[in-house]
Image (cartoon, helix red, strand yellow):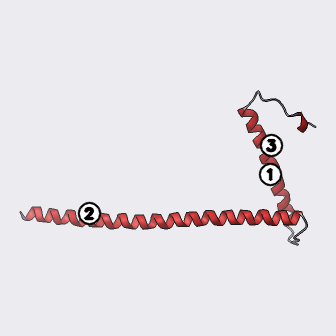
Amino acid sequence: MRHQKNNSQGIREMLTQFQKEVMKTGKIGKKMLTASRTNAHLKETYEELGRMVCESIKKGELEWGHPRLKQMIQIVEACQKDLEEIENQVQKIKFPSAPEDISKKE
């Protein structure tokens, strides 16, 4: 009989510990989810800020004397052009029999 009490008590202790660990894991998961959402929001905000600054500089509404600025804008424009070209290539791969757009030929 004593053996059964020890077993029952051991199982209860194990279940209690398991329950505590599950609760901790849940709390950690919630914090990580919140951190992930916050990080995504921060990234989106930085991207939007960067686009706004870039457009304002191009329009002459904002001047910034940083020596790397012009180079960064050229990189952004080159990347945008590259992405457009990649998208065109992907479309050609997806739809190889599509008529060719002669308006973009040089």
In this rendering, the count of numbered labels is 3
Report the residue that reaches farthest toward the top.
Answer: 97
Mark 3 or 2, nearer chain start: 2
Q: What element carries label 3?
A: helix
Residue 92 placement (x, y as % from top left) = 76, 34
Residue 83 placement (x, y as % from top left) = 77, 47
Residue at position x 71%, y 33% from top? 94
Q: Is mark 2 on a helix, strand or loop?
A: helix
Q: Which residue type carries mark 2?
A: Leu
As measured in the structure, the alpha-carbon distance from the residue carrying label 1 to the one carrying label 2 is 56 Å
Tell me: residue 69, above or below residue 98: below
Disc 3 + disc 2, Cβ < 8 Å: no
Q: Is mark 1 on a helix, strand or loop?
A: helix
The answer to whether residue 3 is left or right of residue 89 is left
Residue at position x 37%, y 66% from top? 23
Which label sits on residue 50? none
The image quarter in which residue 60 lies: bottom right
Q: Which residue type carries mark 1?
A: Gln
As measured in the structure, the alpha-carbon distance from the residue carrying label 3 to the one carrying label 1 is 9 Å
Report the residue that reaches farthest toward the right.
Answer: 106
Q: Quadrant of the N terminus?
A: bottom left
The image quarter in which residue 102 lies: top right
The residue carrying pointer 2 sits among few (fewer than 14), some (14 to 19) or many (20 or more) residues within 10 Å by Cα, namely few
The residue carrying pointer 1 sits among few (fewer than 14), some (14 to 19) or many (20 or more) residues within 10 Å by Cα, namely few
Residue at position x 75%, y 66% from top? 49
Which label sits on residue 15? 2
Residue receiving disc 1:
80
Mark 3 or 1, nearer chain start: 1
Q: Which residue type carries mark 3?
A: Glu
As measured in the structure, the alpha-carbon distance from the residue carrying label 3 to the one carrying label 2 is 59 Å
Residue receiving disc 3:
85
Residue at position x 80%, y 51% from top? 80
